[in-house]
Every structure is written in C-alpha cells, then in structure tokens.
Image (cartoon, helix red, strand yellow):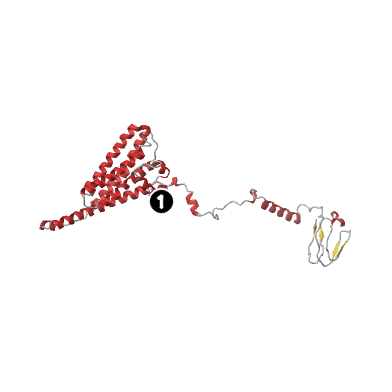
Amino acid sequence: MTDFYGSNTGQYDEFEDETAVTGEALDFEDYDAGTYDNTGNTDFGQGNYGTVEQPVTSAPSYGSSSFQKDTVEQDYMDVMDDPGSDSGKVAPDSATSTKPSFVEDEEEDTTKYKCWHVENYRSYFNVDSWEVAHRFLRVVMPLPIGPDFFERFGDNADLYGPFWVSTTLLFLLAAVGNFASWLRYELSSSSNMDSDSAAEIWEYNFFKVLYATIAIYSYVGLMPLAVWGFFKWFDIELSLTNHYMAFGYSLLTYIPAVILCVIPLVPLQWVLIFVACGFQTFFLVRNYIVPLKPTLVRGLILLGVVAAINVGLALLIKLYFIR
C-alpha cells in the first residue's frame, strides 16, 4: 500500500514495503507532469493526478498506524450500516430520557396506592359529560331499548354520577323543603291577619340539611352494599361499583319531582314524589332482573324488599322534607 503525503507538491514520501510495489501496478491518468521509474522512486512535478485503477496488493503490517486507522474506520462503517447490531445501540439513560412525564404517569400501577390516596379512586371517575348524560337518559327511559344498564355500562362503572346526583338531591330537599315552608307561612299570614298569627316569625330549618344528608347518603351507601352481599350469597358475579352506580343514578328521578314540589299543592306533591319513586323502582327492577334470572324466586324476593325500601324513602321525603 502506498501512502502519499503533501499532495499539493506532488512529492512522494515513503513506501512501507518497497519490494511489494512495481512500476506496472500504478496507472496514473491525466497527470500533468512527473516521471516514474522501475526502481520504486517517483519524481512528480507540479500538477494534479488522477485515480489509481489497480490498487496495491500489499497490506500494511499489523500494528502500523495505517492499519489501525483503516480498521477503526471500517468497524465504524459496519456499525452504522447495520441497524440491528447491538454494538451500535446506546443504552437509554433515565436522566437524559426524552419520554414525557405524563406518559410515565399513565403507565403507573395504581394498585400501589393506599385506600386513603385520591389516586386509588381515579378510575371510578373516568367519565365525561356525554357518558353521564347517556346514563341519565337510560334511567328516565320507561321502556328498555338495547342492552340493560349493567351490560351497557358495567365495564366502565363510575361513581362520579352517583355522587353528584345524591349530593344535588340532598341539597334540593333541604332548600325546597324550607322554601315550601316559607311559602306556606306567607300564604297563611296573608289570609290570617289576627294578632297571634302576625306575631309568628318564620325561621329557616338548618337541620333539614343534616337529615337529608343522613337519609340520602345512608340509602346510597348501604343499599348497594346489602344487595351486593345478597349477590355474593346467590353466587352471582356483579361488582360492587356496579351496584353503587345503579342505585346512585336511580335517584335522578327525584330531582325534577322535588323541584316541582315548590308548587303549594299537596295532592300534586304526592303524585310527583310517588311517580319519581315508581320510575326509580322500575329502573332497578328492570336491570336487576337480568342477572337474577338463575335464582329468580330469591331474586324477586330481594327486589320486593328493594321496592319496599324505595317506598319508605319516598314517604320520608314527602312527610318530613316536603310537608
């Protein structure tokens, strides 16, 4: 192999092995000036030289600078040309990783959280407004269309809707109950102008908020738990979250009825409350009858108990909160 240095002057510096080079091994084209002889000496003049058609057959000795340079360059090119080579891969460094932090959070296992951590309940609130509205529609729909409630929403059971439906209802009970009481007071005061009636002063009953909270949250918290226990006894698989979802959404029927109870007509109030109770009970029976088919007799007894408790809740709403 021949190494040329100082190509701007056209001078030859050295051969590593003179015996391996012959005059016939080199063929320079388009060279402006210079001479070559068979002794291995080259005397080139000024000018540019062309390409070597036949390379020198000798290889540099192991350990020489030329051999080391060529070997390193060839290894580098092999690694770059072979994408599947392990030697060309760089181990990822966690400190310099470009993976977004939110992707790591989504892949994080939520089972490591304790029961008092908010992150443990994140999956139970994974619904948007359209999904909640669709579940509202299925509650108030009088006739079954398509799959039942558990089949349609059981894979993505949520607690978001049940929580807000229950919370809204209890505040409505306290607010509407006090407003109905105030309205009756005003009507009675305008009709009875005697001194005793005029001396009476209407007061807001704050205990209705407390009692409504106890009544509604007890119903939503204990009824699904009791029905889930009976399902376990009947050997029927239905998650506890599905029970809470069904009972929580069923209270939606009371919200418009309670709002309309501000009208000071007692017969109308009774009709509104028991229509809401009927829709709620029908919704629960219609959806619970499907998983209870294997044990239909015991299932009907359970649903009868649920209906009786629903009637008791309706009576409590009418007799105490909306008198």
Q: Position of residue 129 (x, y in %)?
A: 40, 52
Task: Specify the quadrant of the image occupied by residue 21.
Answer: bottom right
Give residue 231's position: percent from left, percent from top: 36, 36
User: Residue 141's x, y, as percent?
Assistant: 35, 45
Numbered marks: total: 1
Residue situated in front as seen by the camera: 272 or 231: 272
**Left or right: 154, with 314 as reference point:** right
Q: Position of residue 93 (x, y in %)?
A: 56, 53
To which quarter of the image does residue 293 belong? top left
Q: Is residue 201 above or below residue 294?
A: below
Seen at 20% across and 53% down, the residue is: 181
296 and 229: which one is in front? 296
Residue occupying image coordinates x 14% and y 56%: 191
The answer to whether residue 188 of the structure is visible from this angle is yes
> In this orientation, which residue lies closer to the viewer: 245 or 38?
245
Q: In the rendered view, does 276 fall on the left or right side of 151?
A: left
Left or right for 307, reference 135 = left
Badge 1 marks a residue whose secondary structure is helix
Quadrant holding the N terminus: bottom right
Q: Residues within 10 Å of mark 1 (few under 14, many from 20)?
A: few
Q: Disc 1 residue type?
A: Trp
**Vertical placement of residue 191 versus 306, above or below:** below
Examine the rendering and report whether any part of residue 200 can be seen: no
**Residue at the spot of label 1:** 130
